[in-house]
Amino acid sequence: MIKYYNRKENKYETEKVAGEKYLNWSYSSPAGKGLVELLLKKKLFSKLYGFYCDTKTSSRKIKNFIKEFDIDMSKYDRSYNEYSSFNEFFIRSLKPGARKIDKNNNTLISPCDGKISAYENVNLNKIVQIKGFTYSLKELLQDDKTYNSYNEGTCLIFRLCPTDYHRFHFIDNGICGDTTKIKGHYYSVNPVALKNIKKLFCQNKREWSIFHSDNFGDAIYMEVGATCVGTIVQSYSNGCKVVKGEEKGYFKFGGSTVIILFKKNAVKIDEDLLNQSRLGFETSVLMGEKIGLK
């Protein structure tokens, strides 16, 4: 059971998890852990499942998926029967205006829909994955130069579950640099897996770039793949000016993660998000929602 904080309702809620029993078995039992290491973390498994999700046959799953997880399709640009495959549905686009984007230059917005964990004054050698598990930024980036600039900065981790809108957007006006791609495994990013796999983010496939934000300085923008996420698609153009809320890219099928790191004193994250993270709870946010100030 995964509890998270609903900041709009000021209460805790229980997340509906796709394949919850399977996840608990896979990452908690000896047999399940063996299967994960033997097959599920491998690229081939995610690639094959991704191939299935691109087929016409997979579209039969869409209607029941929407019903089981109460997805509000009125916010999206097509009805459920207009998608030719499950992957096409999974990377669905919002209708214009479906998410309110705070355009104030001093306001930091969420880049995506998901559950956020927020940490200030980050020790580069002990970034929090989940209570008891940490990793270093150097391991995460596999870069000897970039990571040093972010000591005592701010780290935001956005977890997208399979039921979420799976496109990610720019947090500010600015210019985004080239993408660095790092090969890795395909562990689930569900909290069940995070509690059982040390340095999971450092083991999974991931991509990162430097976003030269107009109002928050240079930020590291990273996307982390997961089980069945065989593809991370970057839809922005390297070196071109982008505007706040513009799409940066999207994940194909599966849960996935966006990590953003800011330099020291670049941003002040909303206190309710920091407090819930200190208590060990994620907070639900929507793309475009205010999460901090300059």
Image (cartoon, rainbow, N blue to C red):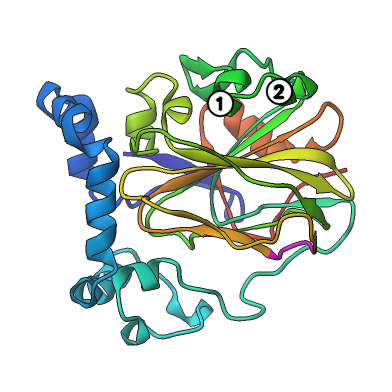
**Tag 2 residue:** 147
- Dominant secondary structure of the magenta stretch? loop
Residue 43 coordinates in the image, percent (x, y): 30, 42
Where is residue 57 drawn, in percent x and y?
18, 75
In the image, the segment drawn in magenta is 242-246
Q: Is residue 33 left or right of residue 70?
A: left
Q: Amino acid at mark 2?
A: Tyr
Give the left or right position of residue 188, taking residue 224 as reference. left
Other residues around mark 2 within 10 Å, as few (<14) / some (14–19) / many (≥20): some
Q: Are marks 2 and 1 in contact (CB under 8 Å)?
A: yes
Q: Which residue is tagged 1? A: 140
Residue 43 to residue 176: above or below: above
Amino acid bearing label 1:
Leu
Residue at image location 51% in from the left, 34% down from the top: 281
Q: In the rendered image of this protein, does residue 90 appear above or below residue 219?
A: below
Q: Residue sitting at 33 percent across and 52 percent down?
A: 16
Look at the numbered disc 2 and give the secondary structure of its residue. Answer: helix
Quarter of the picture containing the C terminus is: top right
Quadrant assignment for the N terminus:
top left
